[in-house]
Image (cartoon, grey):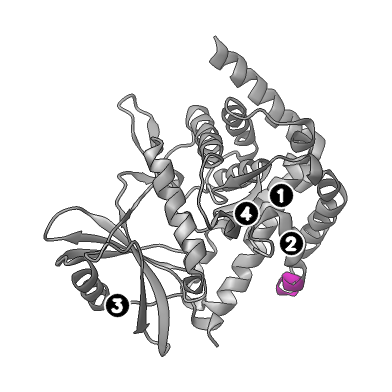
Amino acid sequence: MAEKHSKPNFSHSQVSEILKRCYNLTTLEIHSLPSYDDQNFYVVPVEGCKGVLKILNSEDSEDLDLTEVQTFAMSFLQQKGLPAQTVLPSTSGQLMSLEEIDCGYGLQKYLVRLLTYLPGTTISQVPSTPQLLYETGQMAATMDKVLQEMRHPKISILEREKFIWSLTNVSLLEPYLHLLDGDPLQEVVKSIIHQFKTSVEPQRSNFRKAIIHGDVNDLNVLVEPDGNDGHRISGIIDFGHVQRDYYIHELAINIMYMMIEHPNPIEVGGPILAGWESVLPLKEAEKDCLYVLVLSRFCQSLVLARHSVTLHPENEEYLMITAKRGVYIVTHLWTLGKGQVEKVWFESAAQLNKKMAV
């Protein structure tokens, strides 16, 4: 039953004890932060220096090497001037600690790290202006481009071939489709998976491989006011999906999640695409597959959220955040069709690029 309870459920007193024992910090304030399958706490110690204590789920805690490389990626980006969190060492100089604790499900091992706190609010909570969307696409592309310079002796572990959240593995959703039995969404998802197999997979050899963040979503991008009634990006968080995959997958993931809170979702693609191409212009094959890849990410998000709710019903509200509007958006985009959606995206991207060039 390990999978059933892989999400940690640490109490505030357990968090305080870890902070004291591992970091010699006395807790003044602790707040839970939302998380998909880990546990995050905003902590303020008496000694100053706010932080985020991140406790990995017991399943991911088994892969120390993967977490080590992801932690290194965060630090690498921060050294290159990007607003990524970094991990603070414990009193013994360790960047992570494997804690064996009973948080309600018997003794299990959980990887614990103390991260720097980045100021700002999630981008989901502010208006998505074309300028901010442009900067989001630009930031995602810049980050992935910088990640290609990263060197680490265990870097091959990022070849996560069976990773269910990789856009390479959309067909791995098929065993979960029964969760949509009786729901009209099931036919839409089946059609998109078929389209993915027939139109994306044959072109994959023309995509550019890269190390990508893999989850530049509306809850993982932080913003703060820019002083001109707008916002600027102040942080990129959550590197749990870092993988060796394809550039175009990052762009599709970014577009998909930024649609969720937007009043007119189809308008999101153009500005993000323009920002992305200001750093990494797309190849024809990548452009041609973008529409189906965006819809495929909706399928992953909606189907895997249903699956997670069966495992963690107590976390349903957070797990189903995307689902509330996601069903409407993916159905609408599928009904509009590739030609119409691409026309909106590519034309507005071209207009924005022209405007930015002036």
Q: Residue furthest top?
A: 358
**Residue 43 coordinates in the image, percent (x, y):** 24, 61
Quarter of the image where one finds residue 54: bottom left
Q: CA distance from mark 2 to mark 4?
A: 11 Å
Identify the residue shown where x is 27% and y is 64%.
31
The verdict on residue 184 being magenta is no
* Label 4 vs label 1, nearer the camera: 1
| Three-letter amino acid code of the residue under disc 1 | Leu
Q: CA distance from mark 3 to mark 1?
A: 38 Å
Number of numbered discs visible in the structure rendering: 4
Mark seen at residue 11: 3
Q: CA distance from mark 3 to mark 2?
A: 38 Å
Magenta stretch, overall SS = helix
Identify the residue shown where x is 29% and y is 77%.
11
Q: Going from the N terminus, do you reach mark 1 or mark 2 first? A: 2
| Three-letter amino acid code of the residue under disc 4 | Gly
* Highlighted range, magenta: 175-179
* Label 3 vs label 2, nearer the camera: 3
Which residue carries the number 4 mark? 326
Q: Going from the N terminus, do you reach mark 3 or mark 4 first? A: 3
Q: Is residue 293 left or right of residue 211?
A: right
Which residue carries the number 2 mark? 185
| Three-letter amino acid code of the residue under disc 3 | Ser
